[in-house]
Image (cartoon, rainbow, N blue to C red):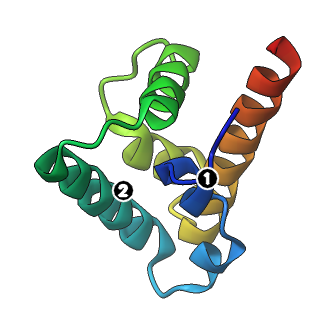
Amino acid sequence: MRTTGSLLGHLLDPRLTQEDEPLIRLAGFIDGFTTAQVHMGVADPAADEFFSWLYGKWERSSEGWQKKLSRELGGDQRSAVEKFQELLAEFVEHKEAVR
């Protein structure tokens, strides 16, 4: 799976866990990135597929990925971002294995 030029390539950056309030910043980064893509008319099929996979994995949780991870990890934002990155790596590995 090609992550270069996709939102996914940026979300694997280990520096994301070093930020203050990393989960809030991650959510803001994702929202900003996807909003910019929409305004520029740029598609990101890899990111779309990842988020569909993620929500499908959680049986369409209505609370959203940010709240779900925060709740599951007791509000620990760094752990939530690390778990998000683990899920992303799992997705990328799965896609590579299927190719």
Where is the N terminus found, in terms of image quarters?
Answer: top right
Return the disc, 2 or 1, that comes first in the chain's sequence: 1
Q: Nearer the viewer, mark 2 or mark 1?
A: 1
Q: Residue at (25%, 50%) from the top-left corner?
A: 37
* Image quadrant in which you'd find residue 81: bottom right
Q: Quick one: which residue is furthest to the right in this view?
A: 97
Q: Position of residue 25 (x, y in %)?
A: 39, 72
> What label does residue 69 carry, if any?
none
Q: Residue at (49%, 74%) from the top-left corner?
A: 22
Q: Classify mark 2: helix, strand or loop.
A: helix
Q: Position of residue 83 (x, y in %)?
A: 68, 50
Q: Position of residue 91 (x, y in %)?
A: 70, 30
For disc 1, the marked residue is 4
Q: Residue at (32%, 33%) from the top-left corner?
A: 63
For disc 2, the marked residue is 30
Name the residue type under label 2.
Ile
Q: Are marks 2 and 1 in contact (CB under 8 Å)?
A: no
Location of residue 28 with respect to 71 vertically, above or below = below
